[in-house]
Amino acid sequence: MVLEDLQAAAQLRQGSLLVVGASTSEVMGERIGTSTSMDVGRAIVDVVLTFARHVGCDVAFQCCEHLNRSLVVDRAVATRSHLTEVTAIPVPGAGGAVAAAAYAALPDPALVAHVAADAGIDIGDTLIGMHLKPVAVPLRGRLREIGKAHITLAKTRPPLIGGARAVYDPAEAHRRLGLP
């Protein structure tokens, strides 16, 4: 349901990048970083990867602060997007269970320093905002929690430029330009 709500608002597709940050401790009702669960991490990664395959988007899984919130991506994504690779392997306690599960699940994982994602899911207040394109738009889905963890969804949009005389609506632009 969370991913359906995000998809309805963000319209992810081939070439889009989704960033996911999650605290398995928070999902289980504990304070972030205190009760890592690989089972919960694997469950989150499996659901997200299934969704990503279905819509055709790429995914970046954010590590915890111990790895400077670096991200696990498929190496093809890192190469295609010219992302800066860093050297570490996320494990529970240093990277987090979700990042560790993603690293294990991807056939050719890479750890990168930063991304500029089109949309994101933050499960347990893991602070994914640094990995979203400007301008981030918070979304509210039908569910507010996964387990005991607070959920924040976000999509992004290009910045609006030009001021009061700028036209943002394609139909209005066509009308003013005399196009069908």
Image: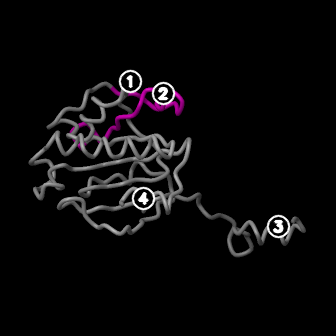
For marks 2 and 1, give the CA distance.
8 Å
Q: Is residue 72 above or below residue 1?
A: above
Q: Earlier along the polypeptide chain: callout 4 or callout 2?
A: 4
Report the disc number at residue 4.
4
| Labels 1 and 3: the sequence-earlier one | 1
**103, above or below 5, in the image:** above
Q: Secondary structure at mark 2?
A: helix
Characterize the local packing of mark 1: few (<14), some (14-19) or many (20 or more) Cα atoms within 10 angstroms.
few
Which of 132 and 16 lies nearest the eye of the viewer?
A: 16
> Looking at the image, is mark 4 or mark 1 earlier in the sequence?
4
Instruction: In the rendered view, tell whether residue 73 sits above or below residue 23.
Output: above
* Residue beneath disc 3: 174
Q: Within 10 angstroms of label 3, few (less than 14), some, or many (20 or more) residues?
A: few
Name the residue that disc number 1 marks. 108
Q: The residue under label 3 is which amino acid type?
A: His
Rendered residue at 49%/43% (across/down): 57
Q: Residue at x 69, y 68 (%)?
A: 168
Residue flagged by tag 1: what amino acid is it? Asp
